[in-house]
């Protein structure tokens, strides 16, 4: 089955052709970094306009690279949420038009489920139960997956997503957008123990995350030390390198602490780490270390598959389309769409240790 995947939930216009849910025939991503960089973050209206400009050439390129025509496509999968409403609508309207014109099935996919499915391309099949941490610019959520396509939300961020914290700290220090890759690179030159930030605590749920306090602590440190944003082309001073390394270290320790608690409480056979922040070199290292200690495999997609892309959307759609699931023509954008359900069948989870 050849699926055309389309993803426009945020600031990437993406299209991919995926064969039988696992073989990537093409995976095209047009980023909008240059458009949003002057603002230090995504401007939703600009994102929608860019998607409108990009969607046709990006899909054409995906078909060309896959060596297929529209007629050879068996189904169309598109992100239906969560994301920016205007941005999502561009992809959805386009996907509907293609599916309608070709008389092919259409399926709307949850963006976070797409991120979790991005591990299918480069790894052996996931062994369940699994734990999945989706850590991106828009979300930080930890899921318990007793079986494929069942998601029980263990914890999520109470405020900023981890990627958002990276982006805001970078903006504060004049380091550009997106902040994650820049901080990752610069943090390698700093001392992660230089500034002592505390790991944010979330009293009601041990698995929840919170990053806005850390972002405020960085802003306070910058103010108290009288630091100013780095100008373009200027060398980054040691004091800022140390600050970045310490900030990154705290984000990574927070994520790893929650993962480690979850591994103690739940008997997982695979650990999945995905979303844009999963590109972070320190986080990847620490996640692999955790996996070795717990003696379970850790699946982290390579960077082009862990950031937003459409191959993951096609992959998530595959088993559902095979079962005959379809979206109607009333399919629309769901900016706040969630991905979780309590395990209704068994009503409980494979708990170990902590009840
Ligand atoms: O998954 P993604 O492409 O888009 C969303 O769905 O949000 O994630 C983008 C986020 C941005 O916040 C970006 O700063 C962050 O991922 N990111 C990173 C790294 N590469 C991208 N954060 C930390 N370290 C990185 N190397």
Image (cartoon, rainbow, N blue to C red):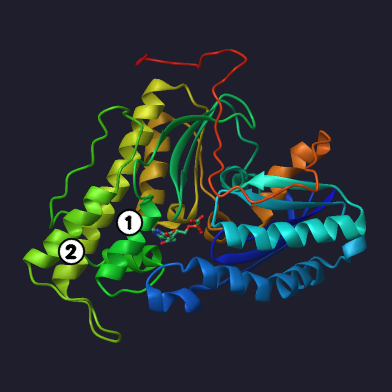
| Residue 116 screen position, x and y as percent | 57, 43
- On screen, residue 270 versus residue 179, left or right, reads right
Q: Quadrant of the C terminus?
A: top left
Image point 49% across, 33% down: which residue? 143
Q: Disc 1 beta carbon < 8 A from ligand 1?
A: no
| Residue 176 screen position, x and y as percent | 36, 74
Q: What is the distance, in whole Å, between disc 2 and disc 1 at their CAs?
A: 17 Å
Q: In the rendered view, tell whether residue 232 sits above or below residue 15.
A: below
Tag 1 secondary structure? helix
**Residue 193: quadrant of the picture:** bottom left
Image point 49% across, 78% down: which residue? 35
Tag 2 secondary structure? helix
Please tell me whether mark 2 or mark 1 is closer to you in this view. 1
Q: Is residue 286 visible from the viewing direction of this image?
A: yes
User: If you read the primary sequence from the N terminus, does the residue marked by circle 2 or circle 1 appear first?
Assistant: 1
Identify residue for label 1.
Answer: 165
Decide which of 286, 245 is in the foreground and name it.
245
Instruction: Check contact, mark 2 vs mark 1: CB within 8 A.
Output: no
Q: In the rendered view, tell whether residue 174 sits above or below residue 81.
A: below
**View quadrant of ligand 1:** bottom left
- On screen, residue 165 versus residue 296, left or right, reads left
Residue 242 disc label: 2
| Residue 77 screen position, x and y as percent | 74, 51
């Amino acid at each position: 089955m050849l699926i055309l995947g389309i993803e426009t939930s945020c600031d990437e216009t993406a299209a991919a052709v995926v064969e039988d849910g696992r073989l990537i025939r093409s995976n095209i991503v047009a980023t909008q970094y240059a458009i949003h960089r002057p603002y230090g973050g995504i401007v939703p209206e600009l994102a929608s306009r860019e998607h409108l400009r990009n969607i046709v050439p990006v899909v054409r390129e995906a078909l060309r690279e896959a060596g297929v025509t529209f007629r050879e496509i068996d189904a169309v999968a598109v992100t239906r949420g969560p994301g920016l409403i205007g941005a999502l609508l561009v992809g959805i309207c386009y996907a509907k038009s293609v599916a309608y014109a070709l008389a092919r099935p259409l399926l709307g996919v949850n963006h976070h489920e797409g991120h979790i499915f991005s591990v299918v391309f480069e790894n052996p099949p996931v062994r369940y139960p699994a734990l999945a941490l989706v850590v991106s610019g828009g979300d930080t959520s930890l899921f318990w997956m007793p079986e494929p396509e069942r998601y029980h939300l263990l914890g999520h961020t109470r405020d900023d997503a981890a990627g958002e914290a990276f982006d805001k700290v970078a903006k504060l220090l004049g380091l550009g957008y997106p902040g994650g890759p820049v901080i990752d690179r610069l943090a390698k030159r700093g001392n992660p123990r230089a500034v002592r930030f505390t790991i944010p605590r979330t009293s009601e749920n041990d698995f929840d995350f919170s990053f806005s306090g850390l972002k405020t602590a960085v802003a306070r440190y910058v103010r108290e030390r009288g630091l100013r944003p780095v100008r373009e082309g200027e060398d980054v001073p040691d004091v800022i390198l140390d600050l970045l390394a310490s900030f990154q270290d705290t984000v990574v320790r927070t994520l790893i602490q929650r993962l480690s608690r979850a591994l103690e409480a739940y008997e997982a056979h695979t650990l999945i780490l995905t979303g844009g922040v999963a590109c972070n070199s320190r986080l990847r290292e620490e996640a692999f270390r955790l996996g070795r200690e717990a003696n379970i495999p850790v699946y982290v997609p390579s960077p082009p598959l862990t950031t937003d892309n459409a191959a993951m959307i096609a992959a998530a759609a595959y088993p559902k389309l095979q079962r005959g699931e379809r979206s109607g023509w009333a399919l629309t954008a769901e900016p706040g769409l969630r991905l979780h359900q309590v395990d209704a069948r068994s009503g409980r989870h494979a708990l170990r240790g902590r009840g």
